[in-house]
Image: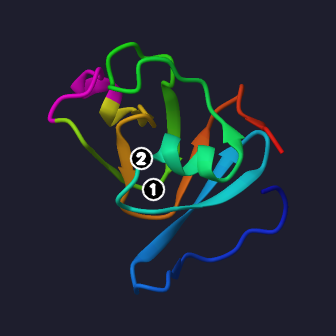
Amino acid sequence: MHGTERPAHADAAGARRMRVRIEPGGFVFEADPARTLLQSAEDAGIELPSSCRNGTCRSCLCRRVEGTVRYRIEWPGLSAEEKTEGWTLPCVAEPLSDLTLDVPHARSVF
């Protein structure tokens, strides 16, 4: 999806969906808090760099400009300093809020 941003909303079951903006491409999609950012991006036709999908290879490493995430694994392949600086791994990160990510190599597959 590219274009006008939409606010986060609840799905049919009442679960809040988060709005994720990918810069510099300006792609916007909705993310389910129970799915990883990578999975939600793929559902929306947005391709993010990735490889292992388990938080170790760092292929998907990108900077979180705003928003918060939680990780599916206790200690993903990030140092405490990298987490503090805003780096994130979308393959194992679930959204806790609306987000903006800096992913220069993201592209739309639609």
Q: Examine the rendered structure and indicate whether residue 58 appears above or below residue 41.
A: above
Query: Residue 32 occupies which quadrant of the picture?
Result: bottom left
The residue to which callout 2 is attached is: 36
User: Callout 1 environment at 10 Å: few (<14), some (14 to 19), or many (20+)?
Assistant: some
CA gap between label 2 and label 1 equals 14 Å
Left or right of residue 13, residue 3 in this image: right
Residue type at mark 1 is: Gly
In the structure shown, which secondary structural element does the residue marked by tag 1 occupy? loop
The disc placed on residue 89 is none
Q: Residue at x 40, y 26 (%)?
A: 53
Left or right of residue 50, residue 96 in this image: left
The residue to which callout 1 is attached is: 67
Q: Examine the rendered structure and indicate whether residue 75 appears above or below residue 38.
A: above
Please state which of the two labelled residues, at mark 2 or mark 1, is closer to the viewer: 2
Residue type at mark 2 is: Thr
User: Callout 2 environment at 10 Å: few (<14), some (14 to 19), or many (20+)?
Assistant: many
Query: Residue 19 occupies which quadrant of the picture?
Result: bottom right
Q: Residue at x 52, y 29 (%)?
A: 62
Q: Residue at x 49, y 86 (%)?
A: 12
Image x and y of residue 6, in percent: 69, 74
Q: Examine the rendered structure and indicate whether residue 50 appears above or below residue 89.
A: above
Q: Residue at x 30, y 23 (%)?
A: 78
Magenta-colored span? 74-82
Name the main secondary structure of what is drawn in magenta.
Answer: loop
